[in-house]
Amino acid sequence: MIYLDYQATTPLAPEARDAMLRWLGGPESDTFGNPHSPHRMGRMAAAAIEAAREKVAALFPPGGRVIFTSGATEAINLAIRGSGGAGSMAVSAIEHAAVLDTARALGVAHELTVTPEGLCDPAQSLPADTRLVAVMQVNNEIGTVQPTLEWHTRAQEANALYLCDAVQAYGKLEVTGADMIAVSAHKLHGPKGVGALWLRDGVDLQEVQTGGGQEYGLRSGTLSPALIAGFGAAAQLAQERREEDTAHVEALWNRARELFDGWALNGSDTARWHGNMNLRRDGLDVARLMSDCRDVMFSAGSACASGSGRTSHVLKAIGLSDAQAKSSIRLGFGRYTTLDELERGAQHIITAAKEQGV
């Protein structure tokens, strides 16, 4: 099988797997302790978590703290629900469902428009009662990179907090300019089931998940040393390999653009992460295409919404018709994608599309 769906998840790095194995201790080991226990085994597990916390924090701006969560969705919910207070929340129209649905559930959502290029202009106005602004750094469906520094400034001017979903950027691009940043380990070759919320110093949240008072009293629940150790190893590896990984992605992007010559690109060609290629071929039956290319793993949209049957809200927000949105596919590639895999996968897709007469 050929895997071209890096926005949905990434392969686990061998280094992350090795880091996890020690903390999956069996009955004859001394590494299965609860990290919140005061005895020696508990302290060993807690030390492993703090060592990983430092590695994860190294990819964030200075002057903040890392709160471990079960993933970015929980981190986003903690940020939105924990910030509390009266007022509205301004969110870009192309945010992940974890942001949009949470804001809507609380009845505080004001949607910020995006251009046909998929960019959210920070010059647009905010409601007078805005208390929280959420604009993601890299869009998960079309890969566009938003002006997060400018949005942070706009939020400060409005006396509001700024939440940045950096899931697709963390470990790939510099993450800067926010009050709260949500990330997930499995999008940078770490394990599934663990993520983090970074909080700028001075930002206080209300506890959302009550219980034992772990994670600075903000997120109760026993932490997993194995998952967090894997997260830390993946973060350290991403930091060490950033230039190499970026150069590899650029080479794959350039080749993919050659292979898919004549296909329309959804979103900006330049203001985007080049590991995400969202393409459109008018008249394409994507469901049939995916059936005809079963050995090529790609997406018809966000993995979180692909089973809903709904037209992509991101593609509609940039002005595509329902028909155009449903004729679009998303290819994602990265560190472990080979040029040969990309070329073979592209050829399968292109051949199958031609068989449809498009």
Image (spheres, rainbow, N blue to C red):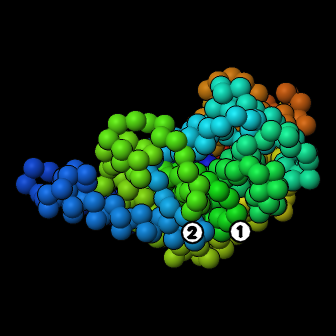
| Residue found at the very far top of the displayed protein | 309
* Residue drawn at the location 24% of the way across and 59% of the way down: 45
**In this view of the protein, which residue sits in the foreground, 247 or 314?**
314
Q: Secondary structure at mark 2?
A: loop
Instruction: Tell me if 310 is positioned left or right of 12 in this view.
Output: right
The numbered mark at residue 63 is: 2
Residue 94: percent from left, percent from top: 77, 41
Residue 310: percent from left, percent from top: 72, 24
- Residue receiving disc 1: 250
Residue 9: percent from left, percent from top: 54, 48
Quadrant of residue 270 within the rendered picture:
bottom right
The numbered mark at residue 351 is: none
Image vertical order of residue 113 relative to residue 253, above or below: above
Please indicate, yes or no, whether residue 94 appears anywhere in the rendered image. Answer: no
Instruction: Tell me if 193 is positioned left or right of 259 in this view.
Output: left
Amino acid type, callout 2: Gly
Residue 339: percent from left, percent from top: 63, 64
Amino acid type, callout 1: Glu
* Residue drawn at the location 80% of the way across and 60% of the way down: 153
